[in-house]
Image (cartoon, rainbow, N blue to C red):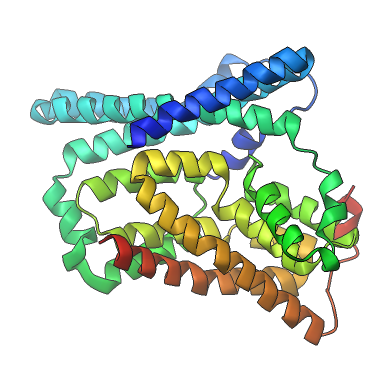
Amino acid sequence: MSSILTWSTYVIVFGALGVLALRDRTKARQAVKVAVKSFFGILPIMLAFIGLIGLLLGIVPPEVISRYLGQGAGWWATLTAFVLGAVLYIASLVSIPLAASLLRAGASVTTIAAFLTGLMMVNTVTLPLEIKYLGKKMALSRNLLSLLFAFAIAIVIGMVLQ
Amino acid sequence: MNTNLPQQISNGAPQGAPVKKTPRQWLADYRWVLLIALADLLVWVFWPAQAAPVIRNTWDYLVEMVVILIPVAVLMGLFEVWVPKQLIGKYLGRESGWKGILLALLFGSAPTGPLYVAFPIAAMLLKKGASPLNVIILLDAWAAIKIPQLLIEARFLGPSFMLVRLALTVPSAILMGWLIQKGIERTGGLDLDPAGSENIS
C-alpha cells in the first residue's frame, strides 16, 4: 500500500511539474531549482541519520529496543519519549525514519507516537522566537495546549493502532 | 546533532544567487556522515559479525529515503512558486468562518520551511487582521501536518498511522485556536511586542 502511495506521489508531483512547465517555463525552472536545493540542503543531515539508524539497528538487538521502548516498558518509556520529543529539535523529515526504525525493531506505537507528536507540536527550542513575534499570551498558550493535545493524540494513536 | 538543521532546510527558499560551497563547508556539512562512516568502519574492523546487518540496514533506509525524498523535494519547489504568501492574509479575518479555517489549514500544510519561518508570517497576518483562531491553526498545521511530512510519514510509518494522526491533529488545531482566541479576547487582546514588529515586513 505504501509503495502504491509513493508511486502515485511521483505521478502527481511530476505531472504537476509538467503542467507548470507547459504553462510557465521560468516558474517551472525555478521550482526545479528550489527542489534541487532543498534536496541537497537536507541531504547531509539525512544521510547522517540514516547512517545512525543503520548502525543502531545493526548493533543493538531488537530485543533490547523492545525491552526499553516496547509494550512492556510501560508508561515511563512513553513519557520519556514524549519529553524528549518536546524538548529536542529534530526536523520531522529526519525524525520520522528514526521513529519508524525503532517501531519496526519493537518499540510500542504509543511511545513512538508520543515522541513524534512531542517533536512536532511542542516547540520548546523556538519558543523564545515565537514569543518575540507573537507575544507571550499566544506563544505560551499555544505551546502549553500543544503539550496536552500532543500527549492525548499519542495515547489515542496507540489505542487505535496497537 | 541537529541544531543547525533549520538553516539547511530553509535554504529551500529562493533567495538570490546560489552560493558556491568551499571544500571546508562541505566537510562541515557532512561531518556527521563522516563520523558515522568512521563508526561503521570501526564496527567492520573490530566486530565483523555485525558489519553485514549494519550495511544492510543503512542501505535499506537509504533507498527508502531517497525514493520518497525526490518527489517531496519537487513538491517543495512547486509550493514555493505556486502558493501566494501575501495574498492569504486577506482571507483569514475574524469573519472568515469555516472558509478561513480551511484556508489556514491548507496554507499551513503547504509550506516547506521550518516552523520559525512561520512566526514572522503569522505576526504579519495578525497585524493585517487575521484572527488568532486562524493564525493558531496555520501554525499548528505548519508544525505538524505539512504535506511533504505526511508523505514521508505514510511511507515510513504506514498510511494508517499518518491518517489517524492527521484525523486527530486537525480538530485539535481548530479547538486550540478557538480556545486561545477566547483566552486572548477575555484578557484584553494580543500582547505583541512592538520591538518585534520591526522585523515584520
Please indicate, yes or no, whether residue B151 appears anywhere in the rendered image. yes
Residue nearest the viewer, comparing B97 with B132 = B97
In this rendering, would B53 be left or right of B199?
A: left
Residue nearest the viewer, comparing B145 with B63 = B145
**Numbered-mark total:** 0
Q: Picture coordinates of residue A81 (x, y %)? A: 36, 62
In this rendering, would A56 be left or right of B147?
A: left
- Residue located at (44% from left, 67% from top): A153
Q: Picture coordinates of residue A139 (x, y %)? A: 69, 68
Q: Is residue B107 above or below residue B185?
A: above
Image quadrant assignment for residue B139: bottom right
**Residue occupying the far bottom of the picture:** B186
Q: Picture coordinates of residue B48 (x, y %)? A: 11, 25
- Residue located at (16% from left, 23% from top): B45
Q: Is residue B4 above or below residue B143?
A: above
In this rendering, would A111 be left or right of B153?
A: left
Residue nearest the viewer, comparing A125 with B131 = B131
Q: Is residue A13 above or below residue A26?
A: below
Q: Picture coordinates of residue A57 (x, y %)? A: 22, 39
Please indicate, yes or no, whether residue B4 appears anywhere in the rendered image. no
- Residue located at (49% from left, 48% from top): A90
In this rendering, would A140 be left or right of B52?
A: right
